[in-house]
Amino acid sequence: MSNTIHIQIDRADGSLQRLIGLVERRGFHIDGINMADEGAFRRISLTIRGRDAGRCMENLGRQIDRLFGVRRIGNDIIQSEAA
């Protein structure tokens, strides 16, 4: 199953790299990314899935919330095809 996280992030140097690095280090695959610039911010939608069943979306969300310059807007569960 995939989840989509909607994030607003500062357009600071390295901010996108920090976000992607955190998601990957916490055991999630990024299946898709959409970005749109909005002045001093970027609006990002990440479609992600855990590497295994033990990965918790709530924990990842709390960790993303703690990144400097990030404001998580929300997350949605998307039905995906079984692998």
Image: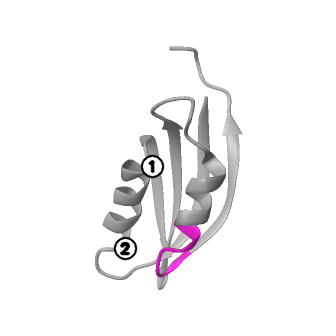
Q: Which x, y percent locates residue 52?
A: 49, 29
Residue 70 higher or lower than 59, as above or below? below
Q: Residues within 10 Å of mark 1 (few under 14, many from 20)?
A: few
The quarter of the picture where the N terminus appears is top right
Asked which secondary structure carries label 2, the reply is helix
Query: Would you say the residues marked 1 and 2 are in contact, meaning their CB atoms lie under 8 Å apart?
Result: no
Q: Which mark is residue 33?
A: 1
Residue 48 higher or lower than 58, as above or below? above
Q: Residues within 10 Å of mark 2 (few under 14, many from 20)?
A: some
Q: Which stretch is magenta? A: 64-70
Q: Residue furthest front?
A: 54
Q: Which mark is residue 15?
A: 2
Q: Amino acid at mark 1?
A: Ile
Please name the residue shown 37% across and 49% down the image: 24
Query: Which residue is nearer to you in this view: 60 or 33?
Result: 60
Left or right: 76 as drawn, with respect to 25: right
Please name the residue shown 57% across and 14% down the image: 82
Residue 49 higher or lower than 58, as above or below? above
C-alpha gap between disc 1 and disc 2: 15 Å
Please name the residue shown 55% across and 40% down the image: 55
Q: Which x, y percent locates residue 14?
A: 29, 74
Asked which secondary structure carries label 1, the reply is strand
Tell me which label, 1 or 2, sits earlier in the chain.
2
Residue 72 higher or lower than 80, as above or below? below
Please name the residue shown 35% across and 67% down the image: 18
Query: Which residue is nearer to you in this view: 7 or 50?
Result: 50
Q: Is residue 65 magenta?
A: yes
Q: Which x, y percent locates residue 21?
A: 34, 58
Left or right: 25 as drawn, with respect to 52: left
Q: In the image, which is nearer the foreground, mark 1 or mark 2?
A: 2
Q: Amino acid at mark 2?
A: Ser
